[in-house]
Amino acid sequence: MSTLKLDRRSFLATSGAIGTAGFFGLPLFAGEAMAQVKKLIVRVDSDINLLDPAYMVGGSEIEIQKAVLPALVEFDDADGSYGWRPSAYVEKFEQRDDTHFDFTLKSGFMWTGGNGELTAEDVKYSYERMKTGDWKGNFEQLDRVEVTDKYSGTLVLSQPFAPFVIIALASGTGGILSKAAMAKVEGEKYTTEIPATCGPYLFEWVPQQKFVFKANPDWTGPKPAFEEVECLIIQEGSAAELAFEAGEVMATKISAATHARYLETPPANSTVTVAGALQYMWLGMNTENEKLADIKVRQAIQHAVDAQQVIDGAYSGTTAKSNGIICPGLIGHRTATKYSYDPAKAQALLAEAGVSGLELELKTLNVQERVLAAQIIQAQLQAVGITVKVIPVDEGPFWEMGDQEKGDYKNLQLWLMRFGTNTDPYEATQWFTSDQVGVWNWERWKDEEFDRLYKEGQVESDEAKRAEIYLRMQEIMEDTGAYVWINHEPETFVHRADLKITVMPSGEMIWRDFKSA
Amino acid sequence: MSAIPSDSAPARREAEGWIKLRRLLANWQGMTGLVLVLLFFASAIFAPLVATHDPFALDIPARLSGPTLEHWAGTDQLGRDTYSRVIYGGRVALQVAAIGISVSLVFGLLLGMLAGFGPRWLDNFLLLLFDVVRSFPTIVMALAAVALLGPSLNLVLAIVIVTTIPGYARLVRTATLALKNTEFILAERALGVGTARILWRHVTPNVIGPMFILAAMDVPVVVTVEAGLSFLGLGVLPPTASWGSILNEGYLLIRETPWPVVAAGVPLVLTTLGFTFLGEALRDIFDPRLGKGR
């Protein structure tokens, strides 16, 4: 994949670039010149709404915070697994016992805007603040932060919680804010302007166009490989691929179809990196809808859908088949389903339920892969006598469909859903408990055992036992008949072969860790 | 009535009709347009006979193939036959164009005559209404409507109709205003003929000609609006094929295979050209003001 060769595509890309450069009167080798000042140019797929770690949406907002805010620990992909390591800001970060984590910050890290030095008070302020924000789920088990001296302190959990560090601190929610700077902000909440930063870069935002990170002259920590980072906001996937092939950006996220094409004919001088497959997609069924209230009908649908065909047709065969909500590589990942693709059985179940001429609506996000997936499912269900109307829905209404307060949840029948998660199985299970009915549990089932296991899974520290808990939880979900597991879509990136990229398993790039080879 | 020789007027009109038809056939643009339009109608109406495959039949192992003897225009991402989908897509285009244009013609005619012939306040009110509707950008209005109501072909039709009516209505209104004070209309009025009869018997025949020409030239606009909305995923529901939705799928796959874009683009271009040529030729032939100058 990293071999340098001149094929038709690279020839076209090069001539295109030459043509464009000539047209705009740019020096032809601008890209080469940029490489010398150590400037990284990457593509991001969305603009920002909110940069406050307690209230953000995620995605590129996390990427920005990772570049400019301090944290106690950082994501570590060194041995190919999803782990963490103490960050450059700390002397030490250690787990004392099940509920105590001691940290000591290094001295001399200064906040911008004359907001003083990074101290343990900032850590206390930031993490205790998270307990009241939108992302409080990640900090549910944090009881308090005790400050021992200017630089040291202890995070105290209310109960043992094995994945605390990875979920709360190493993920996107681990950013630390300046207490002094936040005190000056009205309501102690901010939107797109971070009151004070403390990182290798200073952040500038050109709305709808780009993020620019220039070197922070006061930075005393380890120098990143690139003095400057420019992130171009390109929403359209195919436009981003063209930009990459023309050499305009050095790294970009790519779709499943492009991944398949790059596996066959890679663009010259490039490498494809798969960051992780922490997404799980399924066909959901509303157990309270009258047409789907009979479990036999739901089971018939489970038997009528061939997920492998969906993966081959809509995802070019590049994604892993799913058997539950726990993604591959995590504790409790399932390797098989209890149901299997069996149209005859599906028909028999429908007959048993006394249902014929069933007509259902299948809603999906209006995204190419999902609309294709929906059409394959439509054809498969047609084969067992269920007529399906596929309805592509735009983002806004889609995410409210099953919301008890906003959406028309009673008439919701079938839908294709994809959730993202992080590296602990606890995260994925939290959306299906009884109190999530009508929030994110759109399938609307309740199960006491599931709720009990959810609590047990959080405090269990024995890996084998945890695995058992999560396997059983997925079995309970499957037994409701409301789920047909589809796939785990990976976060795939293409980048220049001379660039080593660091991406969190949930798909966010960490630019300060990018290296040029 | 008896003063006029009974056979001469229809005979003259018939002869005039023949002359005009011959002029249309002699005009290469008109001829090309006519052939393309007929092809469009024929392929859409006889789609089940012309298509080689079921446009909905999936064949995933054979996905994304180029043109072969089996699949003349290749297959799409789900292995469906692109040629057959394009042929069936023509039906959607025809349906939207035929229903959309004829309904807007009828409403445009009625409202336009009302505005032109009715009282002043009604005229002002209707004009305001037409201009308000015309001031909405079609696509943006469609986006908003779809966000509220969800995508469907009926919604596309409704949007086409609502946005096309004001154009026709304004044309009819102007023509009616011009006729309103002509002597033969004044004479009718003096004779005590009712408004409805004046409009139907005397105004309509005089304004309908230009309307048809305008309609012929509007067909490609409507076809492209439907294709545009379907391209954005706001038109027909999957798996129904429309030229716009095939173009969109093809556009997303353009780096893998160019065939879907070509297969859906060619009929769109030809249909547009066909109706435009035909419309222009008709205008040249039937519009007396243009004819004299030649």
Image (spheres, coloured by chain):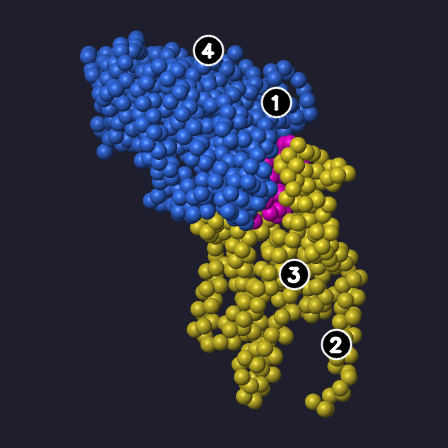
- For the N terminus of chain B, the image quarter is bottom right
Residues marked 4 and 3, same chain: no
Residue annotated with mark 1 = A263
Q: Position of residue A93 (x, y in %)?
A: 30, 11
Residue annotated with mark 3 = B216
Residue annotated with mark 4 = A79
Q: Is residue B256 magenta?
A: yes
Q: Quadrant of residue A2?
A: top right
**Mark 2 — on which chain does it sit?**
B
What amino acid type is highlighted by mark number 3?
Answer: Ala
Instruction: Give the residue drawn at x 31%, y 27%.
Output: A452
Q: Quadrant of residue B67?
A: top right
What amino acid type is highlighted by mark number 2?
Answer: Arg
Circle 2 crowding by C-alpha within 10 Å: few under 14, some 14–19, many from 20:
few
How far apart, in angstroms, are the residues tagged by discs 4 and 1?
24 Å
Instruction: Give the residue drawn at x 34%, y 22%.
Output: A457
Span shown in magenta: B235-258
Circle 3 crowding by C-alpha within 10 Å: few under 14, some 14–19, many from 20:
many
* Chain A rendering hue: blue
Do tag 3 and tag 2 residues touch (Cβ < 8 Å)?
no
Instruction: Give the residue drawn at x 77%, y 84%.
Output: B7
Image vertical order of residue A438 relative to residue A248, above or below: below
Q: Secondary structure at mark 4?
A: loop
Of the pair A264 and A410, the residue shown nearer to us: A410
What amino acid type is highlighted by mark number 4?
Answer: Asp
Q: Quadrant of residue A193?
A: top left
Q: Secondary structure at mark 3?
A: helix
